[in-house]
Amino acid sequence: MGSRLSAAAVAFMALSTISVHAQPSREGSAEEFEAKLGYQTGTVSLRGGMATLRLPESFRFIGPEGSRRLLTEAWGNPPATANRVLGMLIPTAASPLSRDGWGIVITYEEEGYVNDDERRRSTTRRC
């Protein structure tokens, strides 16, 4: 795949110390909120088939909508933090709503890639 997939390990450990305790929402308890995040395990395909993730048992995946809800509603981040998020990896050892909760945000930027053919053409000089 031409462009690089960047998995940005966002410093949610720091955010968790600020306060990522379960914030019961309009929907009910923290357990109900977490149950609706849409966890996936095993082999997961990112939107558009751009990548396939083979998750170890120590991680689970949340898609774009669950990620948006976790980032903004539970963790209190501004809505723009969820823009272009393809999903998140959440460790199975702790709830993302607990004091020990954290996650890895997966995004994709299609910039900086130069096709090998284009590179060769740009470095070939004609006299």
Image (cartoon, grey):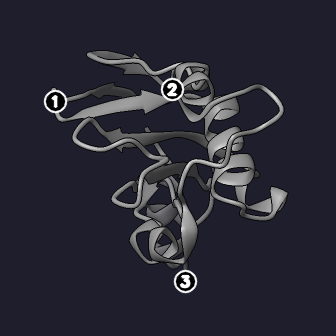
The disc at residue 127 is 3
Q: Secondary structure at mark 2?
A: loop
Tag 2 and tag 3, C-beta contact below 8 Å: no
Other residues around mark 3 within 10 Å, as few (<14) / some (14–19) / many (≥20): few
Where does the N terminus fall, quadrant-wise? Answer: top left
Residue 9 image position (x, y, % from top left): 40, 63
The residue singled out by tag 1 in the image is 56
Give amino acid for label 2.
Leu
Can residue 51 be seen by looking at this rendering?
no
2 or 3: mark nearer the eye = 2
The reply to whether dot 2 and dot 1 touch (C-beta < 8 Å) is no
Q: Is residue 86 left or right of residue 92?
A: right
Q: Quadrant of residue 19?
A: bottom right
Q: Which residue type carries mark 3?
A: Cys
Q: Where on the picture, by quarter, is residue 69?
A: top right
Q: Nearer the viewer, mark 2 or mark 1?
A: 1
Res 86 quadrant in image: top right
Q: Residue furthest bottom?
A: 127
Please state the horizontal and vertical placement of residue 75, each as a whole percent of the image: 63, 57
Viewer-proximal residue among 127 and 84 = 84
Distance, label 1 to label 3, CA atoms, is: 55 Å
Kind of residue sitting beneath label 1: Pro
Where the C terminus falls, by quadrant?
A: bottom right
The alpha-carbon separation of the residues under discs 2 and 1 comes to 16 Å
Local crowd size for mark 2, using a 10 Å CA cut-off: few (<14), some (14–19), many (≥20): some
Residue 21, given in percent of the width and then of the height, sits at: 53, 56
Provide the secondary structure element on which disc 3 rests.
Answer: loop
Label 2 or label 1, whichever comes before in sequence order: 2
Earlier in the chain: of badge 1 and badge 3, it is 1
- Marks 2 and 3, the one that precedes in the sequence: 2
* Residue pointed to by mark 2: 46
Residue in view at x 33 percent, y 59 percent: 100
